Image (cartoon, rainbow, N blue to C red):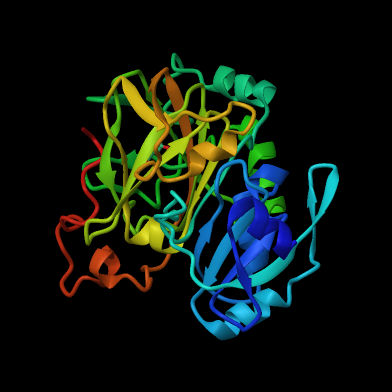
Amino acid sequence: ASHILLKHEGISTVSQPTKSLVVANGGLGNGVSREQLQDVLGEVGEVETLVMPPHKPYALVTYRSEVSAQRGHALNGRQLQCGDQIVTLYLSYVNTVDSELWGCVDFPPGLVLVEEFVSPEEEALLLDAIDWTSHDENVTVQKVLKHRRVKHFGYEFRYDNNNVDKDKPLPGGLPQVCVPVLERCVRDRHTEVMPDQLTVNQYQSGQGIPPHVDTHSAFEDLILSLSLGAKTVMDFRHPEGRSVAVVLPERSLLVMKGESRYLWTHGITPRKFDVVPACDPKSPAAVTSDLSNHSNLTLSRRGTRTSLTFRKVRRTPCDCGYPSACDSQQPTAPPSPPSLPRSQTD
Ligand code: AKG
């Protein structure tokens, strides 16, 4: 494998341990998904960066420490089930991985995108089941906001205080049609708990949602967002200014946890076209890369996107590791969440 990597890709492997490894066979080009590889590599230590160049049959991983990389190296020979084929991973040390050189910057930590999470048939079923003409306030609360329309199930999300009335559940609960999707989220270990709140956002072309952090005291760590009907670009911003634009293809599931949920804002800029990588439609995984370093970009006209955002209402104050962004951990109780989670009503 080392010989082929050097000859075809210019990657030279080294025998002495370093923090970085090339994972031969572990690439998007041979059917390994980012989340699948991240799961395996993350079992043995903290992954700092994972670079998966579009269409290539290998990935490059850098661990936080050399000790973790040594445990990663011991994954050599590990087999993965990818669709109906079994892929064997071969790992070798490399000197350094320059993410910029490779044209990919990693997602915010804790962010996972699962492409084709629902089939086109399920997508149609879910879209059909959202009845925008129903106003039964026992089941759903519906609002037209400046840049989108919304519907809430389980609990109403209130845009005046960016929170939910925890003692006022909507008796209808979550729509039955969502149950198979949520069961799959549990089966695939994206969540251990069943969400009890759903916000449906519908964006026409040109609409969006302001950057915000979902109020920590309102919801537990995990946020799941299913994109239906059309793709969009979601912008993630770190408080220190770093930003990552992530293409969310239709039928994909976005899983936000940890730092990406608690510290980074997420939002959708209202516009009619997005800049996306000009990728081979047979290999949609390529579009999950951050856009800033792509050389081959194109314009994509926005269609009507409906997103289903599932969350679990929090019952005890948040004690996350991001106090600067946490309304539960402010020194004095603020009248409304501080300037941290911005208004989501615009
Ligand atoms: C929200 O409703 O707070 C969202 O962030 C929606 C995100 C989405 O449309 O995927």
Q: Give the residue at x 85% y 42%.
A: 84
- The location of residue 262, given as percent across then percent down, is 36, 60
Vertical placement of residue 126 versus 236, above or below = above
- The location of residue 287, given as percent across then percent down, is 50, 37
- The location of residue 193, given as percent across then percent down, is 60, 57
- The location of residue 25, given as percent across then percent down, is 72, 54
Ligand 1 picture quarter: top left
Q: Give the residue at x 34% y 44%.
A: 292
Question: In front: 311, or 70?
Answer: 70
Could one spot residue 3 in this view of the protein? yes
Q: Give the residue at x 32% y 70%.
A: 322
Question: In front: 220, or 290?
Answer: 290
Q: How many numbered discs, if any? A: 0
Question: In front: 36, or 168?
Answer: 36
Could one spot residue 143 in this view of the protein? no
Vertical placement of residue 328 versus 311, above or below = below
State which quadrant residue 125 falls in. Answer: top right
State which quadrant residue 268 falls in. Answer: top left
Question: In front: 95, or 115?
Answer: 95
Q: Give the residue at x 55% y 80%.
A: 18
Q: In this view, does 210 lie to the left or right of 53?
A: left
